[in-house]
Image (tube, grey):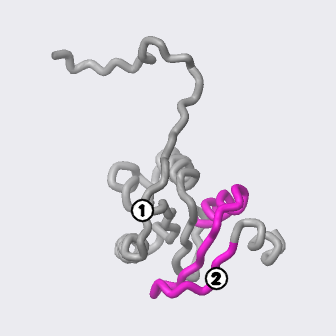
Amino acid sequence: MSSELNLESPRGTTGHPRILLLGSTDRPMVFVCSPFAGCVRENIQNARRYSRFTYLSGYMPITPHLMYPRYLDDTQTKERQDGMEMGIRLLDLCEEIWVFGDTYSSGMQLEMAHALGTHMTIRFFDRDCKEYKKRGGLELQKEEGI
């Protein structure tokens, strides 16, 4: 058995983008948007709590800032940018974005702007997971004057 990786395209590949069919599930995917930088330890604990709340609410939480910092260095510009880009790709797979807390980091603002641009439903929760606003992308743009 060879330990080399074959990174060539498999035979018969057309070069066209693949189509991802997610189908319906009992747990719609929700992107969990909350701070990471700053007090990292506290923010990780909060993100875990928000993810659990999302799960207990019947959804499948997608929380990139709990996954990527395990192997990416957020203090390295290139790795932070790569993590943000991968997170945005995951956001595109989700049906909603849930924003937690009352302070929005630059990364959170980027995620919310992307969600607005795709007319995704955005739900806002305080630190205690109490919802205080739910808007579709177009509604929020009009309301906030964006």
Q: Nearer the viewer, residue 13 or 86?
A: 13
Camera-side mark, 1 or 2: 1
Query: Residue 15 — which label?
Result: none
Mark 1 nearby-residue class (10 Å; few <14, some 14–19, many ≥20):
few
Looking at the rendering, in which quadrant would you find the N terminus?
top left
Answer yes or no: is residue 124 visible: yes
Answer yes or no: is residue 77 visible: no
Place of residue 138 in the rendered image (x, y in percent of width and height, measured from the top left)? 77, 67
Q: State yes or no: residue 132 in magenta.
A: yes
Query: Residue 133 — which label?
Result: 2
Residue found at the far top of this picture: 11
**Cα–Cα span, label 1 and label 2:** 24 Å
- Taking 42 as reference, is 77 above or below it? above
The magenta stretch is 108-135
Query: Residue 26 — which label?
Result: 1
Question: Element under label 2?
Answer: strand
